[in-house]
Image (cartoon, helix red, strand yellow):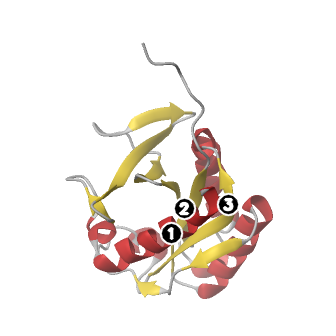
Amino acid sequence: MACASKPSPVKLVVGTIFSSEGVLIKAKKKLENRFGPVDFASEIMAFDFTDYYEKEMGKNLKRQFLSFEKLVWPSQLWHIKRYTNRLERDLRGPASGHSRNINLDPGYIAASKLVLATCKNYSHRIYLDKGIYAEVTLSFRDGVFEPWPWTYPDYRSDRYIHCFNTIRELYLKQIF
C-alpha cells in the first residue's frame, strides 16, 4: 500500500486576456501584492483564437501570461481562482461599457504538467472546492508540453507552449 505524501510546491501562472493595457497594469500590481514578484511575463499577443469573450470584453483582445517567483502549494489553487474572480469583478469599470475588462485564469506548472483552474465542470475536470475545478491542460512528455484532446486551441499553439516550457525551466531551477 502506498503512503500519502506531501506534494512539491508549484509555479503559479496566470493567463490574462484584456483589451486595455491599463487594466493589465492594475491587475498585475494587485497580483504582485498578493503573490509576490512576477518572474516571467510573456510578450503581449493578439488573442484571436476565438471570439468567445468579445460580447463581454470587446474586440481586439490581447493575451499575456505571468508567472510568479514565489512557489505555491497545489492545494491553494481553488483559493487563488476565487481571488482572481473577485479581482476581475473589482477591475470592472463602467467606463469601458463591458461587463468584464480582464479575464484572469490561474493555474500552475509542475515538472510534469500545466494545471488550470476553472468554474466550469466537465468530464475531465476534478472538483476542488467552493465551485472550482482543476484541469490538466498540458502534460510534459519527451522534453516539451503536449496537449490533450480537451486542450483549448490557443493552449495547443507553439507560441503558448514555448511560454510554458520557459516557465517550467524557471520552476525547475527553483526546486533543484
Q: Secondary structure at mark 2?
A: helix
Callout 3 amino acid: Leu
Q: Which mark is residue 169?
A: 1
Residue found 67% across the figure and 60% down from its top? 87
Residue found 59% across the figure and 43% down from its top? 8
* Residue in the foreground of this view, choosing between 36 and 83: 36
* Residue in the foreground of this view, choosing between 69 and 48: 69
Percent coordinates x, y for residue 2 in the rendering: 45, 18
Compared to residue 167, the image places residue 8 above or below, namely: above
Q: Secondary structure at mark 1?
A: helix
For the residues bearing labels 3 and 2, Cβ distance under 8 angstroms: no
Compared to residue 90, the image places residue 1 above or below, namely: above
Q: Secondary structure at mark 3?
A: helix
Residue found 59% across the figure and 80% down from its top? 96
Q: Which residue is mark 2?
A: 172
| Crowd band around label 2 with a 10 angstrom C-alpha radius: few (<14), some (14–19), many (20+) | some
Does residue 100 show up?
no
Where, quadrant-wise, is the N terminus in this rendering? Answer: top left
Does residue 91 show up?
yes
Compared to residue 81, the image places residue 129 above or below, namely: above
Between the residue at mark 3 and the residue at mark 2, the CA separation in whole angstroms equals: 29 Å
**In the visual, does 163 lie left or right of 130?**
left
| Crowd band around label 1 with a 10 angstrom C-alpha radius: few (<14), some (14–19), many (20+) | few
Callout 1 amino acid: Glu
* Residue in the foreground of this view, choosing between 12 and 83: 12
For the residues bearing labels 2 and 1, Cβ distance under 8 angstroms: yes
**In the visual, does 129 lie left or right of 26?**
left
Front tag of 3 and 1: 1
Q: Which mark is residue 87?
A: 3
**In the visual, does 37 lie left or right of 13?**
right
Where, quadrant-wise, is the C terminus in this rendering? Answer: bottom right
